Each structure stands twice: as C-alpha cells, then as structure tokens.
Amino acid sequence: MRLGPRTAALGLLLLCAAAAGAGKAEELHYPLGERRSDYDREALLGVQEDVDEYVKLGHEEQQKRLQAIIKKIDLDSDGFLTESELSSWIQMSFKHYAMQEAKQQFVEYDKNSDDTVTWDEYNIQMYDRVIDFDENTALDDAEEESFRKDKKRFEKANQDSGPGLSLEEFIAFEHPEEVDYMTEFVIQEALEEHDKNGDGFVSLEEFLGDYRWDPTANEDPEWILVEKDRFVNDYDKDNDGRLDPQELLPWVVPNNQGIAQEEALHLIDEMDLNGDKKLSEEEILENPDLFLTSEATDYGRQLHDDYFYHDEL
C-alpha cells in the first residue's frame, strides 16, 4: 500500500527527499534521538551538489538571497518571523518540492511522451512488466498482490476515465493528501485494510495490527507504547477508544505539519537571542548556517531555486 500509516510523508524536505514521508524524515533527522546538522543542511540546500553550489556563491549573493527568503516568510511584514510563519513556509516548501518531484516522475513514467501515464506504463516503470490481476484470485507474490491497491487508487485518480492519467491526475495518484476528491477513497482504503470487524471504525487492537501481547512480559515493548500513545493522544480526538473515518485521515495520509512546527520551534529556540519567541533578520544573519541547515530553506536548496528568492512567488 503506497500510503500507509507508517509511510513517510514527503514533502519538501521529503521531497527533497520528498516524497518520502514524515516518519522517514524524522528517522533521518533524529537518528537515535539526536539531531543531525548535516541532515538540516541537506534539507535546506538539498543534496551535496546543492550544498557545493551554495558554497560557490559569494557572501554578498548568499546574504541577498537569504534576505529575500526571510522577507517572503514574514507574511505580515513586521520584521519578525513567528512560529506560525516559519511553519507555514516550511509546509509550503514541502508541497512545492513534492509537486516538482511528481512532475519529474510523470515524464519518466510517460514512456511514449503522449502527456498521459497509462496503467501499463506505470507497471513497466515499477516492475518492468505488466502485472495481470484476477478479481477473484490473489497473486502468490505478496508485494505484487499489494500492487492491486495501487491500481484501485490509479483508477480513482483517473477522473475522466481516459486511457491514462494527466499530470494533474498523476499528482492526485501520487499525493492524494493534496487533492480533495481522493480523500474519501483513501479513508475507505484504510478501512478495508484495518477495520477487521467491519463496524466502520478502527479500534486500538486493529490499529496495532498483528501485534499479540506476550503474557510472560512485564510490559509492552517500547514501540507498542509509542503506538498506543499516538492512538490516544494524536488520533482519537473524541476519546471514544476508536478512530472514525475523519480521525483516520491524519494516520493514513500523514502531512508535514508536525515536522514543520517542530522545526520552527527548534529554529526559534536556537536562534532567538533576546527571548521574544520570534526571529529578526539580524538574529538569523547572526547565525545563517543554522538557518541554512533547516527545513526553513530546505537546507539551503531554496537559495538555488528562484521560485523562492525572486520577488514573485
């Protein structure tokens, strides 16, 4: 299943990775609980090649582009960057790079360059062959069988029922979290997979999947405690012990809001010299490397993307 509860969400930093996902991004950013400064730099600048390009810029040009980005983040033009402004910018950046990656993938998948991606072309890109599905027979290969869900999502994204997906439909297929008409399908897909008793909800037991409590153990393993905490405090908003369809959505299609907020708080905590809980341009320029090793500039990558530092956004 392409989008599952444990899929890494994407996004900008993801995209830069992107499309990869929130959980994975967190693993990369906090291996063994420690923040990686080099990961921050890669996120701001992108891959090592982008870091090298940034270094080649003269000091004056570096500062000029960074100031332009700071100005864009400052939505109310009061001269300060708040947690909300930083978080919104980082989320926008995630989405931008996710869309850019999807567009690049579209070109790769469109084998005959007819501006559509057919199911066969998608198959060939993923498996080097076309996989045939029988409606009533499961495939022996579990990975290939899971590909059946991709076909359902592919068909749902194909709004005009044409021979293939347009670019817009392909983006809906790859990033259903960005497209309203895919929401109901993604929720239903999650219920089919996790709602074992068919009551229209996902209980804690169903949420934990195949885990079985060990009666000889004194306590649950750490990962179970973490998952239970997520269920209770992050997803079960009405505290009824089960997830309804709307509560399922942030689980099965995680967004980057949490990562963005965490990074915004981290930057303010590290760079706020006068303790006013916001950042001035002077505070950022006092320690530009920290700002350029964070999602706020996609690890410096934005300094090489005129989408971000030009006047028009």
Image (cartoon, rainbow, N blue to C red):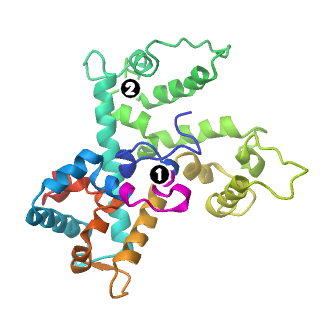
In x, y percent, where is residue 155? Answer: 47, 25
At horizontal 63% and vertical 58% (from top left) the residue drawn is: 235
Picture mark count = 2
Q: In this figure, which residue is indicated by the disc labeled 1?
A: 28
Work out which quarter of the rendered image holds the N terminus and state it: top right
In x, y percent, where is residue 121? Answer: 38, 17
In x, y percent, where is residue 182? Answer: 48, 39
- Residue 44, located in which quarter of the rendered image? bottom left
The amino acid type found where label 1 is placed reads Leu
At horizontal 37% and vertical 87% (from top left) the residue drawn is: 275
Q: Residues within 10 Å of mark 2 (few under 14, many from 20)?
A: few
- Residue 300, located in which quarter of the rendered image? bottom left
At horizontal 26% and vertical 79% (from top left) the residue drawn is: 283
Magenta stretch in the rendered image: 25-39
Above or below, 70 relative to 150: below
At horizontal 27% and vertical 53% (from top left) the residue drawn is: 45
Q: Residues within 10 Å of mark 1 (few under 14, many from 20)?
A: some
- Is 136 on the left or on the right of 275, as rendered? right
Q: Secondary structure at mark 1?
A: helix
* Whether residue 305 is visible: no
Q: Choose between 277 and 56: the one closer to the eye.
A: 56
The amino acid type found where label 2 is placed reads Asp
- Is 162 on the left or on the right of 113, as rendered? right
The label nearer to you, 2 versus 1, is 1
Q: Secondary structure at mark 2?
A: loop
Above or below, 275 relative to 131: below
Work out which quarter of the rendered image holds the C terminus and state it: bottom left
Disc with the residue nearer the chain's start (2 vs 1): 1
Magenta stretch containing residue 37, yes or no?
Answer: yes
Above or below, 199 relative to 105: below
As drawn, the label of residue 160 is 2
